[in-house]
Every structure is written in C-alpha cells, then in structure tokens.
Image (cartoon, rainbow, N blue to C red):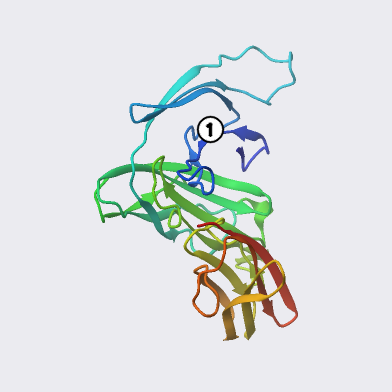
Amino acid sequence: FPWYEEQGGFQCGELFVRRSTDGGQTWSFKMNMTNTHNESEVYPSLAELVDGKLHIVYEQDVVAGSYVRGSSSLSFNPVKYLGYPVADGNAAALTIDSPPDAVSYGQSYTPKVTVQNRGAEPISFSVSCQADYGEYCFYMDTQPVRDLAPGATEQVSFEPWVPDTVLQGLSGTFWTCAGFVGDTNYSDDCVQKLVLVGIEEAADRKIRRLRFTLGECHPNPFSQSTSIRYEIAKAEYVSLAVYDLAGRIVNTLVDQDLSSGTYTATWNGKDSGGQLIPNGVYFYRLKSGSFTATRKTVLIR
C-alpha cells in the first residue's frame, strides 16, 4: 500500500497487515507496521504466525526513488525484524475529536481520536489516522495504545497536520481506524468525517461555503452497519436511498427537508421492513434539488 508525501509527491512504501478469520470473506483494517513517513520502501521476506506472534523480516530501501540509478552514492539498506503479538479482542474507534469540520490551509492541527477496548481483556493496538483528498493521501500517522483496560477509553494524539495550499476549497475524508492482528469485530474499527479546507478571499482567509457532497461509507465492505457522510449546501428536500443491482429501492435512509450542513446516516444492512438482506453489492444514492450522486458498498456477513 503506497503512502504519498504531502511535499514532493514520492510514492513511499509502508508495510501493512490485514487479518481474516473467515477464509478471506472479511478483513480487518490495514495496520501500518512501519510508519516511516519518508522516501524509503520496504520489502518483507518472511511473515509467519508462531507462538502467538506475527514474525516479519524486511529490507528497508532507505532512499528509494530519490535518484536516477548510478547518479548518487550508495545507501545502507538495513534488514529489520518485527514481532507483533496476535490476540483476540475488540478495539473500536469512537470519534474524531480533531481536526474540526472546517480548517484553514497553512495552519497546524493536531489530530485526536477517541478509542475504546470493547473486549474482556486488556489489549494493545495501533490507531491510524489519514486524510484523503481525491485519489491522494495527504496525511497519515499511526500511534500505539498500550494495555487499555476492558471498557476503558483513551484519546490518542497524532503528529501535527498542516493542510497544503493545493487543498484550498476542497472537501476530503479524514478517517481513523483502531485495530490489531486478532481483532474479532471489524465493523467498529473505523470512523470518518468530512473536512473542508478554507479558501482565500480578498485579504482574509475564510472557510468556503458548503457543497453538495456524498462521501464514501465506512466501513466498506461491512458486516453489521456502515456510516454514510453527506453534505448539503442549502436548505433542500433530501433523499438518500439504498438500491440493489437491479435498481430496486432496498431501504430509504433519509426522506425529508434538511438545512445546510454535514450529516451522517447509518445503514444496518436491512430492508425497509427491517429484514436482513443477502450479501452482495449495493448502491446508495443522494438526491437534493438538481444534485445526484451514487456510490457503491458491499455487504458481507
């Protein structure tokens, strides 16, 4: 999985791990095992589960892609080892406390999220935070949570994020995932929010007005429920419905007049009558005035 630097545009390699307990039908969120945030690339050569740990040996190419071959001095590429414990439990991401829904470019923000141990035993796990604008990731960081007691919550702080000027006027997805190799419930691993980056008008910096936007649902694929974030630019009648592959309405999530703002709808994988529906691909469509947008989600139980 590549990570794109905010400055320079290098495609940088990180080592991620996912886990499946049902033969590949569903997968945990991707955990960043290396979190280098530089121009290196990593090449794993071994990954085995022995004595309750995932053992990984990898080579780190320190200055990958920085120079034309043969034009620079040689770099030392170390071989490193990771021993990651695997244990059953349930880590959940609850809220994204910072940054706010609207930010100004060039200013520094410290992302903060609240996580919880929903299992019966103390657990240690990783929490990732990421900002996606368009097809690119402009921020990523991973922080550890150690020995969190059952039922306890903790607010995790990440490295500062400074929105780049290229993001002026854009709305992107800021999301976080909490989990580990052994997480028994993937449906509560991730939460997301839309974050708007301000534009410059005259001599003042102002946050741009809201736009009609339909965000990617999280988690996706999902097994129990998924959250759909959307943005309404002005007071309008709004319809948000789920459709099957044949174009039939499965469930209507929103059917009312709404004022301008950012909203979240939750779909529990059931039809309008409250019945569970089959696994498969479904579409959710937002309509408001002349605006229409459609996205895809996958239900896997």
Q: Position of residue 54 (x, y in %)?
A: 41, 29
Kind of element beneath mark 1: loop
**Quarter location, residue 253:** bottom right
Q: Position of residue 59 (x, y in %)?
A: 54, 20
- Quadrant placement of the N terminus: top right
Q: Position of residue 162 (x, y in %)?
A: 55, 50
**Quarter location, residue 215:** bottom right
Q: Residue at x 50, y 17 (%)?
A: 79
Q: Residue at x 57, y 32 (%)?
A: 38
Q: Is residue 161 visible?
A: no
Residue 216 to residue 46: above or below: below
Given residues 225 and 70, the one toward you in this image is 225
Q: Residue at x 40, y 42 (%)?
A: 180
Residue 208 to residue 173: above or below: below
Q: Crowdedness of circle 1 by 10 Å Cα count: few (<14), some, many (20+)? A: some
Q: Which residue is mark 1?
A: 15
Given residues 88 and 175, the one toward you in this image is 88
> How many numbered tags mark residues here?
1
Residue type at tag 1? Leu
Q: Position of residue 118 (x, y in %)?
A: 31, 55
Residue 201 as seen in the image, left or right of residue 58: right
